[in-house]
Image (spheres, rainbow, N blue to C red):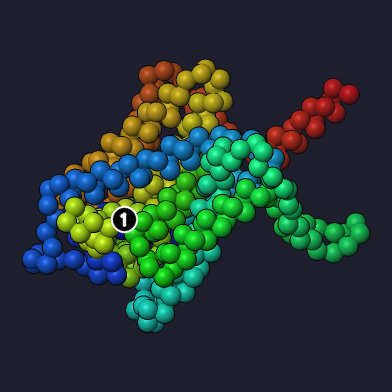
Amino acid sequence: MSEAEPIPASAPEAAAVLNGTDSNGTEALNATAKFVATPEGTALAYGSLVLMALLPIFFGALRSVTCSKSKNSSDMPETITSRDAARFPIIASCTLFGLYLFFKVFSQEYINLLLSVYFFGLGVLALSHTMSPLMSRIFPESFPNKQYQLLFTQGSGESKEEIVNYEFDTKNLVCLLISSVVGVWYLFKKHWIANNLFGLAFALNGVELLHLNNVSTGCILLGGLFVYDVFWVFGTNVMVTVAKSFEAPIKLVFPQDLLEKGLEASNFAMLGLGDIVIPGIFIALLLRFDVSLKKNSRTYFYSSFLAYIFGLGLTIFVMHTFKHAQPALLYLVPACVGFPVIVALFKGELTEMFRYEETSPEEEGAKDDSSEKKDQ
């Protein structure tokens, strides 16, 4: 039986922690005889978690290519610089320890109630954004699709400044309505399927919208979180305590007793979203690098994607063999960075890979304007 630790949204740590949990997040017995997963149940849970981890990385990476070229302010990616990457493990550590103190001082019930309401709003928006491209294909062309714009400004005249400028249509409203139904289901029932729908949406949006500006920044981020993850899992009990106390859709879960209890199963294997999003944004960067080479090949994307499968499989194997908590990034980081680097060395493109610099749509526009002025 295994679970990967749930991850606070502002601190996407990734760790694998042994033991099943019930629907309230309490520890299911591994040493005693409360619940022992069957080999079939364990295999089904592990296999389902791996598949659910791969889907947001694959489709999020594909959508990140389109997102990087978007001119719509609502779809603009958030670019992570090397300075952001260097500070991230420190910020994540402070957030994690702050949550640990909160759960020690205040009532866990009230904290999780506030978190549920907070993630209800975020989850509805994330799931709506995830569903939007699919709905555009499902609806017929004859569907009356009206356009809307939500605009907030500050000041007047020449000093007027846009605060929010969001464009949407009728299809987006339909997506929002469906997502709200899922949100209410999660808010009142905390069902694992609703949790997974929100978790998948968070992961896919993270991979799509969080962009590393270059490979060096990715190495700094993954390297820092590698150390962070190992320290908080092996060095303290902070991460495990927060994981067992934190109730929010920032993890993917799958019941190990599904075959016995059906949809009412309650002993879960878990995978934190940090295990998906952190390697996922690096894999998405390599896909955009592949596109920039204009060779009609996806060598670096597929090599890193296969490396992720290998690293996640190794995490599960070690965790299941030694029956001890494992920091997933301990295996994922060397695999996801090492495999593409070896491929680049073999192809003689290592220098080109590390020189690749992703520019934002605004910077591209500025370059185009400057080139037009030079031509004139």
The percent position of residue 176, horizontal first and vertical second, equals: 57, 56
Q: Between 71 and 158, which is closer to the camera in this rendering?
A: 71
Please identify the quadrant where the N terminus is shown: bottom left
Quarter holding residue 337: top left
- Furthest toward the front, the residue is 142
Residue at x 79% of width, y 27% of height: 371
The percent position of residue 362, horizontal first and vertical second, equals: 71, 40
Q: Between 242 and 26, which is closer to the camera in this rendering?
A: 26
Please identify the quadrant where the C terminus is shown: top right
Please indicate whether residue 247 sits to the left or right of residue 145 in the image. left
Residue at x 72% of width, y 48% of height: 146
The percent position of residue 93, horizontal first and vertical second, equals: 41, 62
Q: Between 120 and 6, which is closer to the camera in this rendering?
A: 120
- Tag 1: Cα neighbours inside 10 Å, few (<14), some, or many (≥20)? many
Residue on which the image places disc 1: 253
Residue 53 in view, yes or no: yes
Residue at x 56% of width, y 37% of height: 137
The percent position of residue 14, horizontal first and vertical second, equals: 34, 53
The answer to whether residue 373 is above or below residue 254 is above
Residue at x 52% of width, y 47% of height: 130
Please indicate whether residue 162 sits to the left or right of residue 250 in the image. right
> Does dot 1 land on a helix, a strand or a loop?
strand
Instruction: Specify the amino acid type for callout 1.
Output: Val
Residue 228 in view, yes or no: no
